[in-house]
Amino acid sequence: MDNAFDLSLLSAELRRYGLPSLRDRLGGADPAPVIDPYTIDRTVDRYRRGKRNLEAVCAEYGIGLDSAHDAAADALAAARLACAIAGRHPKVAALGPAELHRRQIEWYAEWAADFQNFLRRKGDAAAVVDEAWPVREPADERV
């Protein structure tokens, strides 16, 4: 459900095997549009307590999740979850794919900045939370 993690991992694995990364394959661009239930849920229900993993968010929205951590089951649950979030939040449902993608970039950056500030207030003065979404590049390859 965390597309930034999944797409970043996929890109890194492509690179590890000497294959073009996702960005390389797309002429330097991120894949788009990406619909990320994790990013959307954190934005539309910011103050809900509890975990935000796939199982917990599926339970919140009444989505069945059989065989958690099985790629096909997780992907199907994430797709159903995206539909359920849209059903509960008409303002999200009203956004077209390109606009939703653009907003998720903003929402993720806002969340990352807030989380980084939280970590620093809690004592980790050097905490850095990467605000890149949907694909993060390895630290040694950032310019």
Image (cartoon, helix red, strand yellow):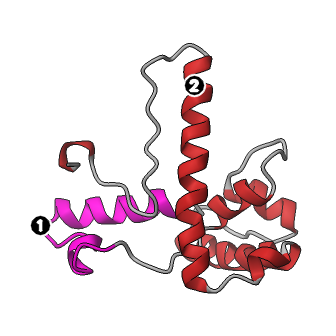
Instruction: Tell me if residue 95 comes above or below residue 2 in the rendering.
Output: below
Say which mark, if any, is on residue 119. Answer: 2
129 horizontally vs 11: left or right? right
| Element carrying mark 1 | loop
Q: Residue furthest top?
A: 123
- Describe residue 78's horizontal placement relative to residue 106 as left or right: right
Rendered position, 128 above or below 71: above
Q: Which residues are magenta?
A: 3-29
Q: Mark 2 packing: few (<14 Cα in 10 Å), some, or many (20+)?
A: some
- The CA distance from mark 1 to mark 2 is 36 Å
Residue sitting at x 78%, y 49%: 46
In reply to whether residue 60 is colored magenta, the answer given is no
Q: In this rendering, is residue 137 above or below 72? A: above
Q: Which residue is mark 1?
A: 18
Residue 134, image quadrant: bottom left
Amino acid marked by disc 2: Leu
Pointer 1 with pointer 2, Cβ within 8 A: no
Quadrant in which residue 41 is drawn: bottom right
Residue nearer the viewer, 67 or 13? 13
In the displayed structure image, the side of residue 34 where residue 29 appears, left or right: left
Query: From the viewer's perspective, is residue 134 above or below residue 95?
Result: above
Ranked by sequence position, the earlier of labels 1 and 2 is: 1
Please state the horizontal and vertical placement of residue 108, each as a whole percent of the image: 56, 54
Q: Amino acid at mark 1?
A: Gly
Q: Quadrant of the N terminus?
A: bottom right
Residue 139 found in image quarter: top left
At horizontal 62% and vertical 17% (from top left) the residue drawn is 122
Position in image of residue 84 (x %, y %): 81, 76
Name the residue located 11 percent from the left edge and 67 percent from the top edge.
18
Instruction: In this rendered view, identify the residue nearer to me: 29 or 137.
Output: 29
